[in-house]
């Protein structure tokens, strides 16, 4: 091997070896003041699953009209909630990120967030994603929500939407703001944190087996 | 003189290709493999069980091939492997495009949608890899003839 080529090879190898560390130790960006203090009531703990002191915190930014978000929620997150959140290994936080082109996504997020105030976030979210093709065309979200709530609960949700619309909008804006801070620019995007250290910020969907493999490798460290 | 220039050109092409491969690998190994797994899954061509091992191994394979190209060691076989790999990437992008998938290329990490730019760049890289590989095989045959 020529000496210059060997030198280039060694330099590249050293650079790559040095690059292994930064992403693992990158600390979370400092949070700026939240846009609205009242928004917390609609964010945590109602739109989260698992225990707050779980070793891994997973934040997922989704848009209710996004097909990849539907796939992630129905095929990956549902199983994650059963296997990892219920067992205290992962604390999953749902965050809204309604995209500009999706005209009904924000309204769907309002319904889900309002349902969170009566502890029915997951039921409504699952219904919204399962029937995405229907309401995203018609814009008629209420029948989809009504199908999974008792009439009394539906009335409560509608009342919350009417009386606290400003707070719900503020909660959505807060999620969008937090997403922007995390450099979220597409949905779904997942941020995994362990003891305040960011493990990954990953746009896109992935199969449950892949996420399971990743979480197991992190939890076994 | 002409042969000398072509040899020089191929050497620089090989090093450039090696640096591109090493850089792409560097970006992937320096981020969580989960991120790359998301990019692979978006193409919807592999079964779920294949995504995790590929997301963990492919960046290291790219790194090894990139470093081998830069070093000039086993150029023929490295070139062939790089050509096949790039052709595979290009085919995957084509099928995604024709299936109407609006996804990230994943070539240099997330955030770059498949489009004209990615096709031109990857097409050029495939061309470069073919030239480097053919050049390496032809050069070896020429040297063998001279020895005989």
Image (cartoon, coloured by chain):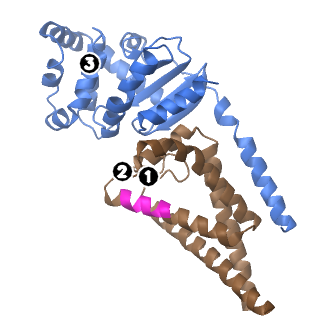
Label 3 to label 2, Cα distance in Å?
29 Å
Residue B102 circle label: 2
- Going from N to C along the chain, the mark reached first, 1 or 2, is 2
Whole-Å distance between the Cαs marked 1 and 2?
Answer: 7 Å
Task: From the image, tell me which residue sits under label 3.
Answer: A123
Tag 3, which secondary structure?
helix
Q: Colour of chain B?
A: brown
Q: Chain of mark 3?
A: A
Mark 2: secondary structure = loop
Residue in view at x 22 percent, y 34 percent: A132
Q: Position of residue B106 (x, y in %)?
A: 50, 50
Residue A139 appearing in the image? yes
Q: What are the residue bounds of the magenta stretch? A: B88-96
- Badge 1, how many Cα within 10 Å: few under 14, some, many 20+? some
Compared with B83, A10 (above or below) is: above
User: Is B15 left or right of A150, judged from the image as shown?
Assistant: right
Residue A98 in the magenta stretch? The answer is: no
Chain containing mark 2: B
Q: Quadrant of residue A66?
A: top left
Q: Are marks 1 and 2 in contact (CB under 8 Å)?
A: yes
On residue B113, which mark appears?
Answer: 1
Q: Nearer the viewer, residue B109 or B57?
A: B57
Q: Residue at horizontal 43%, vertical 11%? A: A37
Measuring from the top left, give residue A207's x and y in whole percent.
41, 37
**Same subunit under labels 3 and 1?**
no
- Residue B61, percent from left and from top: 63, 54
Q: Are marks 3 and 1 in contact (CB under 8 Å)?
A: no
Query: Which secondary structure, mark 1?
Result: loop
Main secondary structure along the magenta-highlighted residues: helix
């Amino acid at each position: 091997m020529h000496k210059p080529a060997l030198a280039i090879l060694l330099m590249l190898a050293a650079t790559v070896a040095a690059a292994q560390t930064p992403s693992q130790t990158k600390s979370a960006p400092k949070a700026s003041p939240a846009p609205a203090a009242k928004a917390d009531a609609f964010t945590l703990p109602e739109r989260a699953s698992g225990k707050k002191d779980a070793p891994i915190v997973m934040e997922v930014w989704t848009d209710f009209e996004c097909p990849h978000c539907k796939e992630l929620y129905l095929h990956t997150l549902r199983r994650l909630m059963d296997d990892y959140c219920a067992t205290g290994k992962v604390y999953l936080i749902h965050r809204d990120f309604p995209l500009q082109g999706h005209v009904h996504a924000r309204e769907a997020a309002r319904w889900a967030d309002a349902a969170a105030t009566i502890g029915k976030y997951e039921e409504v979210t699952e219904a919204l994603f399962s029937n995405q093709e229907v309401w995203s065309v018609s814009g008629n979200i209420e029948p989809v929500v009504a199908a999974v709530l008792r009439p009394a609960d539906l009335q409560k949700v509608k009342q919350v939407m009417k009386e606290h619309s400003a707070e719900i909008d503020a909660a959505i804006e807060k999620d969008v703001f937090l997403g922007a801070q995390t450099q979220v620019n597409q949905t779904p995007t997942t941020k995994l944190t362990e003891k305040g250290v960011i493990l990954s910020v990953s746009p896109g969907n992935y199969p449950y087996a892949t996420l399971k493999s990743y979480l197991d490798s992190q939890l076994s460290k | 003189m002409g042969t000398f220039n072509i040899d020089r050109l191929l050497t620089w092409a090989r090093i450039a290709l090696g640096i591109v491969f090493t850089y792409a690998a560097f970006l992937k190994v320096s981020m969580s493999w989960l991120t790359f797994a998301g990019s692979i899954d978006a193409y919807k061509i592999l079964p779920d069980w294949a995504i995790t091992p590929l997301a963990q191994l492919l960046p290291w394979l790219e790194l090894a091939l990139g470093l081998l190209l830069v070093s000039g060691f086993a150029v023929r076989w490295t070139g062939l492997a790089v050509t096949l790999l790039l052709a595979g990437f290009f085919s995957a992008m084509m099928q995604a495009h024709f299936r109407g998938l609006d996804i990230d290329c994943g070539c240099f990490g997330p955030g770059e949608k498949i489009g004209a730019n990615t096709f031109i760049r990857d097409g050029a890289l495939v061309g470069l890899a073919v030239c480097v590989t053919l050049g390496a095989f032809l050069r070896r045959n020429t040297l063998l003839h001279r020895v005989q």
